[in-house]
Amino acid sequence: MRESALIVSKTLGILAPEIKPGVTTLYLDKLAEEFIRDHGAEPGFLGLYDFPNTLCMSPNAQVVHGIPNETPLQDGDIISIDCGAVKNGFYGDHAYTFEVGEVLPETKKLLEVTKESLYVGIAEFKSGNRTGDVGYAIQKYTEDHGYGVVRELVGHGLGKTMHEDPEMPNYGKRGRGKKFVEGMVVAIEPMINLGTKRIKQLPDGWTILTADNKPSAHFEHNVALVDGKPELLSTFQYIYESLNLKTNEENQFRVKIYD
Ligand code: MG
Ligand code: MG
């Protein structure tokens, strides 16, 4: 599972420097597919429930499950990229919302807070806790900023299939839900809207977008419960290396990276 998480992490890392105005999401999708196959893995989303591409590409008001296309990204856009890969029969599932050129301050803040809420949630993925503890933490953190927490889509267990028990909602009540057990691997993935929590779907049967057309952000890590504590299997470090960003945000968790 570490290997699979590493591939999806590196895939987002090679995409990061390519994300600029004028680039199409279909081009980025092809880059990702090539990279994943070159590294002995298969795209995890391609063909899954009949999804047509390697990446889910969701710009601006799109929450998740957007389909890559020939529309060039524009200065001021945000683009949520969700990447799945399967290696040795195990899935990795990883997402990050990128800025394209210069983004409005209120949108920047949404990305910042959503990413912070991911870590706030991960910290609650520990022995003795339940799914509701993670959900509560993410909901509280983001609603305190006035944002909308999507209800219809949730994180999930991860393993030999992409979506396993338990469901990992980004909302909930402390002490409720399924209890975490040692060795469990989950995908924690807040989907947070600048405005309303309500969503709608495009006629393509895939694309989910906000009901008020305001921006939405999505960050996702794969996390294992090891010795009672969360251990990150995926990492944003490849993205940060590509973009020359320095952060220590992942230092609070155990991360074992190997090549
Ligand atoms: Mg995902
Ligand atoms: Mg997921």
Image: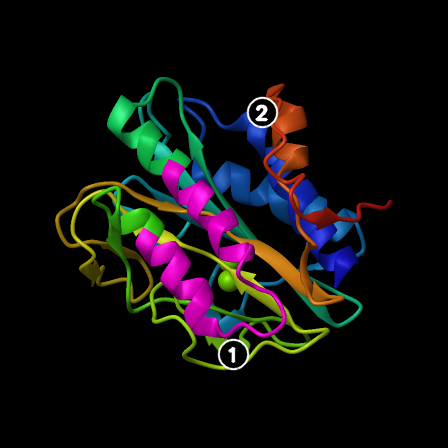
In this rendering, the answer to whether 24 lies above or below 11 is above
Classify mark 2: residues with Cα within 10 Å, few (<14), some (14-19) or many (20+): some
In this rendering, the answer to whether 76 lies above or below 10 is above
Task: Identify residue type, mark 1.
Answer: Pro
Q: Nearer the viewer, mark 1 or mark 2?
A: 1
Q: Quadrant of the C terminus?
A: top right
- Which of the 4 image quarters holds residue 15? top right
Horizontal arrangement in the rendering, residue 133 relative to residue 252 (left or right): left
In this rendering, the answer to whether 12 lies above or below 197 is above
- Residue 10 in the magenta stretch? The answer is no
Distance between the Cα atoms at labels 1 and 2?
35 Å
- Which of the 4 image quarters holds residue 216? top left
Q: Residue at x 70, y 67 (%)?
A: 228
Residue segment shown in magenta? 113-140
Q: Quadrant of the N terminus?
A: bottom right
- Which of the 4 image quarters holds residue 227? bottom right
Q: Residue at x 44, y 67 (%)?
A: 133
Please say whether residue 49 is visible from this viewpoint: yes
Horizontal arrangement in the rendering, residue 188 relative to residue 151 (left or right): right
Q: Between 207 and 107, which is closer to the camera in this rendering?
A: 107
Q: Residue at x 46, y 57 (%)?
A: 189
- Rendered image: mark on residue 166: 1
Q: How is the image coloured?
A: rainbow
Task: Identify residue type, mark 2.
Answer: Pro
Q: Which residue is mark 2?
A: 17
Q: Main secondary structure of the magenta part?
A: helix
Residue 85 lies, in percent from the top left, at 65, 59
- Per the image, label 2 sits on a secondary structure element best described as helix
